[in-house]
Amino acid sequence: MNPELLYNQYMAGDRDFRGIEIRNVYLYSFCLIDANLSGANLEGSNLGRAELINSNLSHANLETARLNSALLIKANLSNANLRNAKLVNVDLTSADLTGADLTGADLTDAVLIDTNLRNANLTDIQTTEKTIFHQVTMPSGRIQDDSNKALSAEELLGRYAEGERDFQDRILYRVDLSGANLRDVDMSRSCVSYVNFSGACLENFGLGRALFSDFRNARFSRFEEWLGVTFIYCDLREANLSGVDMSYSLFVGSNFSGATNCLSGGLQGDVFFYQTTWCTGEFIQGPIGAIYHWRGETREGDF
């Protein structure tokens, strides 16, 4: 199968690509969310920046594949061949790699949070100080934490009360910050997953990517821009989005139903939607860009 045919079939709604042969091809930035690629032969292919969220790559051949900066969040990579694969800056949050062969894989700056590596082969993997292993099930079954970067709710709020606002390159995982005042906090380079922000004050809050998190009734007002922010499986019902510019953002499996002031900050660039419920209650199946979906109309009152 060639890349053009794969793209066309995916955009037409097909998700079943089990066992396909697509070696040494250019699939850079492809959207393959929810795709079934189990047993596929993708050896040597370039999947850099590909969106493989919740994809099934079990028993797939990804030897020497380039997956730099790909989103493999909640992907099934069990028993996959990832020998000498490039996984630089890849996000493997909640991914299943049980029994996978990662011999010689490059995990420079990769994010592994809530990742299952039980019985995986990690011989000669490459990592750096920025590679994150937090709440990871290691091959032996042992749970590994990155305690130097992880913040509890108590520590974050205590440091905030003392005047600290810069919390870059940290981990927020399964913490309860409901109702908290986090005005002017910068976490734009931090890993945020499974966090309860419901009812929180997030005015001028710097955020890069949030996964599986609760933002119901949160207040983002006066937050000038979300340029390039990513929400994956997040709940934003009834949130106040006054003044927010969503340009270049990615929303996957998220719910904005009942959110107020959506797009009141304008839209300078496109927004990508996949299985997202918009403020009006409209379900946007996607994958699709906002400008095409709404035919270039970007004024809130038009939606």
Image (spheres, rainbow, N blue to C red):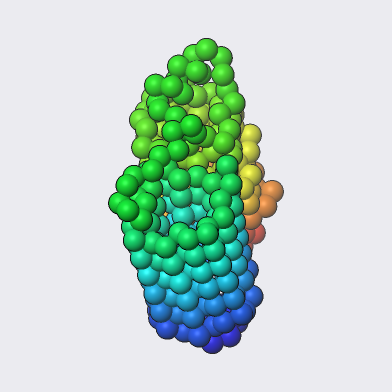
> Is residue 153 something one can see in this rendering?
yes
Question: How many numbered marks does the figure carry?
Answer: 0
Tell which residue pokes out farthest to the top in this image. 162
**Is residue 39 placed above or below 80 in the rendered structure?**
below
Q: Residue at x 37, y 51 (%)?
A: 138
Q: Would you say 17 lies left or right of 230 here?
A: left
Q: Position of residue 289 (x, y in %)?
A: 58, 61
Please identify the quarter of the rendering in which residue 22 is found: bottom right
The residue sitting at 41% across, 33% down in the picture is: 197
Residue at horizontal 49%, vertical 65%? Answer: 103
The residue at the far front in this view is 124
Tell me: residue 218, above or below residue 28: above
Q: Quadrant of the N terminus?
A: bottom right
**Residue in the foreground of this view, choosing between 49 and 116:** 116
Q: Where is residue 53 drawn, in percent x and y?
A: 45, 61
Report whether residue 116 is seen: no
In the current view of this chain or complex, which residue is farthest to the right? 268
Front residue of this view, candidates 181 and 161 = 161
Task: Describe residue 139's horizontal placement relative to residue 227 as left or right.
Answer: left
Q: Residue at x 52, y 12 (%)?
A: 162
Q: What x and y, as percent, mark residue 186?
A: 58, 30
- Horizontal side of 146 relative to 250 (left or right) equals left
Q: Nearer the viewer, residue 161 or 136?
A: 136
In the image, taking residue 166 as reference, residue 137 lies left or right, namely: left
Q: Nearer the viewer, residue 51 or 228?
A: 51
Image coordinates for residue 165, horizontal then vertical, percent: 57, 22
